[in-house]
Image: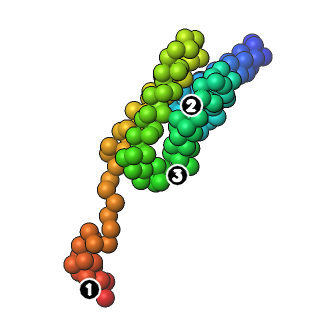
């Protein structure tokens, strides 16, 4: 009886462990599917270079602009936040061009990528519209600094 119980316990433990690993992997995949994060960005480039070669060559400026902004977001969110309105407008134009191409492709993969591009664009728009203005030394209240230094003496 105890051998059967031990075997049952081992099998149950193994099944629950594998189920937990599978669930964690699925959760990780879902996180990557939200918008063009670093890992999915490389996959998207591969997809476009394979399935939309002509578009990438013909609209190279849009493609380069789009990739540059995605890369900037992934590598330096501080520099990403400092992008000016012209650079942001260029990104939106490039994004519109890419979305138009993906929409015309009419397959499941292009639909998924289209959704990711749309969400990425919305996330970036939110970040740019809600960025905190930079503070320069002139904007800092010098009286408060003097008071702090007087207290610390």
Using the numbered discs, state the Cα–Cα distance from disc 3 to disc 1 in whole angstroms.
Answer: 37 Å
Using the numbered discs, state the Cα–Cα distance from disc 1 to disc 2 in whole angstroms.
Answer: 61 Å
**74 or 83, which is in the foreground?**
83
Residue 13 shows in the view = no
- At horizontal 59% and vertical 17% (from top left) the residue drawn is 109
Rendering coords of residue 9 (x, y %): 69, 20
Reading the image, the residue beneath label 3 is 76
Q: What label sits on residue 59 in the rendered view? A: 2
- Mark in front: 3 vs 2: 2
**11 or 105, which is in the foreground?**
105
Q: Please, is residue 85 above or below residue 51 in the view? A: below
- At horizontal 40% and vertical 40% (from top left) the residue drawn is 89
Rendering coords of residue 91 (x, y %): 45, 38
Task: Decide: few, some or many residues near mark 3? Use Cα within 10 Å; few <14, some 14-19, many ≥20.
Answer: few
Q: What label sits on residue 150 in the rendered view? A: 1
**36 or 16, which is in the foreground?**
36
**108 or 51, which is in the foreground?**
51
Dot 3 falls on a residue whose secondary structure is loop
- Mark in front: 1 vs 2: 2
- At horizontal 44% and vertical 34% (from top left) the residue drawn is 93
Dot 2 falls on a residue whose secondary structure is loop
Which image quadrant is residue 138 in?
A: bottom left
Rendering coords of residue 62 (x, y %): 53, 35
User: Horizontal placement of 141 versus 93: left or right?
Assistant: left
- Mark in front: 3 vs 1: 3
Q: What label sits on residue 37 in the rendered view? A: none
Q: Please, is residue 29 above or below residue 3 in the view? A: below
- At horizontal 51% and vertical 27% (from top left) the residue drawn is 98
Dot 1 falls on a residue whose secondary structure is helix
User: Horizontal placement of 1 versus 140: left or right?
Assistant: right
Rendering coords of residue 63 (x, y %): 56, 34
């Amino acid at each position: 009886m105890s051998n059967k119980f031990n075997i049952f316990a081992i099998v149950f433990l193994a099944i629950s462990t594998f189920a937990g690993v599978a669930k964690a992997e699925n959760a990780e995949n879902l996180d990557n599917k939200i918008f063009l994060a670093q890992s999915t960005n490389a996959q998207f480039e591969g997809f476009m270079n394979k399935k939309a070669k002509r578009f990438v060559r013909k609209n190279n400026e849009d493609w380069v602009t789009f990739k540059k902004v995605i890369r900037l977001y992934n590598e330096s969110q501080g520099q990403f936040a400092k992008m000016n309105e012209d650079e942001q407008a260029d990104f939106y134009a490039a994004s519109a061009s890419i979305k138009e191409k993906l929409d015309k492709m009419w397959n499941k993969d292009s639909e998924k990528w289209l959704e990711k591009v749309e969400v990425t664009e919305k996330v970036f728009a939110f970040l740019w519209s809600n960025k905190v203005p930079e503070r320069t030394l002139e904007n800092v209240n010098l009286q408060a600094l003097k008071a702090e230094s007087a207290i610390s003496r």
